[in-house]
Amino acid sequence: MSGGYEVAVRAEAELGEGPTWDPVTGRLIWLDILGMRVHTYDPATGRRTVRRTEQHVGAVKPRTGGGLVLNLRDGVGLLDPDDSFRWLHHEPVPGRRANDAAVAPDGSLWAGTMRYDEAPGGGTLTRLTGAGAVETVLPDVTVSNGTGWSPDGRLMYYVDTPTRRVDVFDHDGGRVHDRRPFVEIEEGAGFPDGLTVDADGCVWVALWDGGAVRRYTPRGELDRVIGLPTPRTTACAFGGAGLTDLYVTTARTGLPAPHPVAGSLLVVPGAGQGVAQPAFAG
């Protein structure tokens, strides 16, 4: 089923990722991991900004006091409202980079990593607080990707892309346990990448090399497919004033003949009802 997409921002991002709605500024934050750029887009005015980072950047999220938290190649950093930068956690590992990240209901950042060569078990999922506490939650990940929580915060969904699964954990007090498969993406349909959870508790997952975003009910049943024209759909998030528009990032990297919208930020107006995402408490 097609979704009636529109091009929100026409771009040629190598690896577009990480769409995040910032309700304070009314802007959609997204990024180009390999292009080392952080983009913002204001759908009310059409205004766009682009900021270059010094390293490959896997995720960028708003902070409660203003500014941004960045999941970077060599660790997690804080960008203050005055544009000054400092490391919250500096841990350079040769051959490894940051990937997707998400903010939990308690305001902690769950930051993923992966090796550039995608070596099995070379990545991690780490929980960080604004006070600087750091805990490795999952130590043997290959490509740490989409992470999200149910509306009541009791479940956490997680993607390690090569497994072809979205897994689910019980979540309580910043801890997760009882990992189990939620859905498995069948051969030929692509690989699970970024995800978001809507107000009904349904999980939307972008499919790398699948050219689609799928919506699964809380029981793991597929109930909607939004087909898109470029195969490397990477992540999705609800945004706009009413959190009803689904924004989807895309990538051009590795495509011999990219579609004209590959690397652009796409939007499906009125796709569903999102949930306001917490800012990083730090």
Image (cartoon, grey):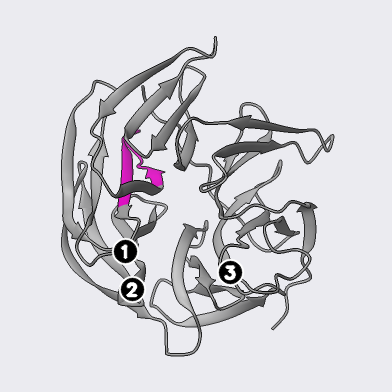
Disc 3 to disc 2, C-alpha distance: 15 Å
133 or 57, nearer to the observer: 57
Residue under pointer 1: 118
Looking at the rendered structure, which numbered label has been put on residue 162? 2
232 or 158, nearer to the observer: 232
- Magenta residues? 101-113
Amino acid residing under circle 3: Arg
Residue at point 63%, 63% (across, down): 252
Are circles 1 and 3 on residues that touch, CB within 8 Å? no
Q: Closer to the camera: disc 2 or disc 1?
A: 1
Residue at point 35%, 56% (across, down): 116
Are circles 2 and 1 on residues that touch, CB within 8 Å? yes
- Across and down, in percent, residue 253 comes to 57, 62
Q: Dividing the picture into quarters, in which one does residue 85 lie?
A: top left
N-terminal of the pair, mark 2 or mark 1, is 1
Amino acid residing under circle 1: Glu
